Image: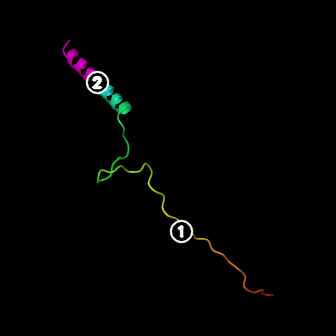
């Protein structure tokens, strides 16, 4: 039966590719970059933006009779 050897090579290649992918997924840190352009380590979370005080205080300066 010609082609059985090629079938075994293909199945073996698929198995080895899956094994390498599984190893990488378990043992390699992946996600966002951990270092900035100068080599310094970036913080885990970006700093929160500064919030300005937007409160308004209303006082009644004189009594109005209506």
Residue matched to label 1:
52
Give left or right: position of 18 versus 62.
left
* Magenta-tinted stretch: 1-13
Q: Quadrant of residue 20?
A: top left
Q: In the rendered picture of this protein, how many numbered marks are placed on residues?
A: 2
Residue under the image location 48 percent in, 61 percent down: 49
| Residue in the foreground of this view, choosing between 38 and 26 | 38
Category of crowding for the residue at label 2, using alpha-carbon neighbours closer than 10 angstroms: few (below 14), some (14–19), many (at least 20): few
Residue 32, position in %: x, y?
A: 37, 46
Q: Residue furthest top?
A: 1
Using the image as rendered, state which of residue 26 and residue 7 is in the foreground. 26
Which element is circle 1 on?
A: loop
Quadrant hosting residue 5 = top left
Residue 49 falls within the magenta-colored stretch: no
Dominant secondary-structure state across the stretch colored magenta: helix
Disc 2 secondary structure class: helix
| Residue 36 drawn above or below residue 54 | above
Q: Position of residue 56 (x, y in %)?
A: 63, 74
The quadrant of the rendering that contains the N terminus is top left
- Residue 25 location (% of width, % of height): 37, 33
Judged left or right of residue 39, residue 60 is right
The label number, if any, that marks residue 41 in the structure image: none
Quick check: 23 left or right of 56?
A: left
Q: Which residue is mark 2?
A: 16
């Amino acid at each position: 039966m010609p082609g059985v050897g090629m079938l075994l090579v293909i199945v073996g290649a698929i198995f080895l590719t899956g094994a390498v992918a599984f190893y990488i997924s378990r043992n390699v840190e992946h996600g966002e970059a951990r270092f900035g352009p100068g080599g310094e380590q970036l913080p885990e979370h970006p700093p929160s933006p500064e919030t300005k005080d937007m409160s308004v205080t209303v006082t009644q300066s004189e009594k109005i009779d209506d």
